[in-house]
Image: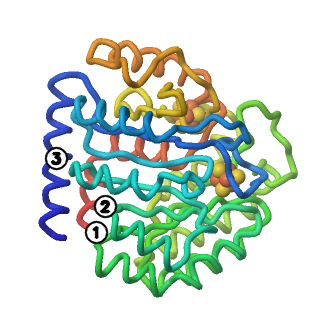
Amino acid sequence: MKFKKLMKYLNLFTAYIFAKCSNTTPFVRIIPTDKCNLKCEYCWQHKNSDLEINEEEYKLIVKKAINLKVGIISFLGGEPLIWRFIYDAIKLCSDMNIITDITTNGTLLNKESIMRLSENGLDFLNISVDGVTTVKNLKCIEKNIEYLRIARDKYGVKIRVNAVITTKNFDEIMMIIEYLNQYRIPISLGYAMPSLEHKRMEGEIFFSEQDKQLIDTIIKYVRTKKKEGYKIIDPIDYFENIYKYIRREKFWECNYPGVFGWINVIGGCKIRSCTKKMDELNYSYLDLNSKKIKELKLLLLEMTKECNKKCYSNCAYDSYYYKNNKIKLFKKLLN
Ligand code: SF4
Ligand code: SF4
């Protein structure tokens, strides 16, 4: 297993160098379905359309990814575990030495699904404890903790948890953080944001100036826990800068689609501009080449100027932050 992991990281390194030299991209995000078995109030990326990637399309996408020298394929949704090809999809990538990463809401995790993912070569398992009442989802982790530990310790699957902070759930978030710390499982935390189409709903689950006391409590708590060595992934700046986001200041630049070139592929092998949007661009992943990827990146950068004003995605912010704080990135990698 260690040799297999080594081969995958070697492939990723090659993919990265190739991407630098040829203007391609070492990463692909696959959104096999937009369907989800939950209905989170803050969700940006869920609809019940029948559009999904079929088995044949998936094989063509992987063939193309190999051709473009891709090093990591991520599976997102919707809920990727409701896509019936997910286990074979991961195995196919693993056989080709491509690193795989999946983000699931965790509700479909059980002994069988965790073991199948691990045996098929999954490398990263991200469990989003989504839903305003996250305790229900924490139970998905609690009841599976032994299998998750086997996945991590025996199969080398890197596990992390994501959670969304709303104005109503911070007590539960603290419970989750304490629970995960016992097992040294890292957690990434993002503030809930109203979706691009919605007007801001003050006083709902989204933060406003009126929540100053709660926000200050969150910042203080996160700072303390980080100092105590808790594995909270996002930098403290993310939590502190919520005030700037509330005031609609321009203080960060999303570099996700353009610089790092994450390409999001949906049913029909079409491209979506961002996993947080539900659009479909006039590009097919199967037609991409170096010239078209360059053109696509420019289009995505242009589109990002608009959505960036309303978005405070923690993962996109983290990417921007560490790109501009190399020493902090280095320290983080050492940890
Ligand atoms: S689990 Fe994720 S995709 Fe599903 S509704 Fe919640 S936020 Fe949306
Ligand atoms: S700012 Fe970035 S992460 Fe947010 S919606 Fe736009 S492209 Fe997506």
- The 10 Å Cα crowd at callout 1, few under 14, some 14 to 19, many 20 or more, is few
Taking depth in this image into account, of 85 and 312 the one nearest to the observer is 85
Q: Quadrant of the N terminus?
A: bottom left
Along the polypeptide, which appears first: circle 3 or circle 2? 3
Kindly identify which residue carries mark 3: 11
Task: Tell me the element at label 3.
Answer: helix
Left or right of 264 in this view: 143: right
Specify whether residue 191 is in view. no
- The 10 Å Cα crowd at callout 3, few under 14, some 14 to 19, many 20 or more, is many
Along the polypeptide, which appears first: circle 1 or circle 3? 3
The residue carrying mark 1 has its beta carbon less than 8 Å from ligand 2: no
- The amino acid type of the residue labelled 2 equals Lys
Residue 146 position, x and y percent, is: 46, 87
Kindly identify which residue carries mark 2: 332
Taking depth in this image into account, of 301 and 35 the one nearest to the observer is 35
Kindly identify which residue carries mark 1: 335
Left or right of 289 in this view: 142: right
Q: Quadrant of residue 197?
A: top right
Give the CA separation, mark 1 to mark 3.
24 Å
Q: Quadrant of ligand 2?
A: top right
- The 10 Å Cα crowd at callout 2, few under 14, some 14 to 19, many 20 or more, is few
- The amino acid type of the residue labelled 1 equals Asn
Specify whether residue 301 is in view. yes
| 117 in relation to 18, above or below | below
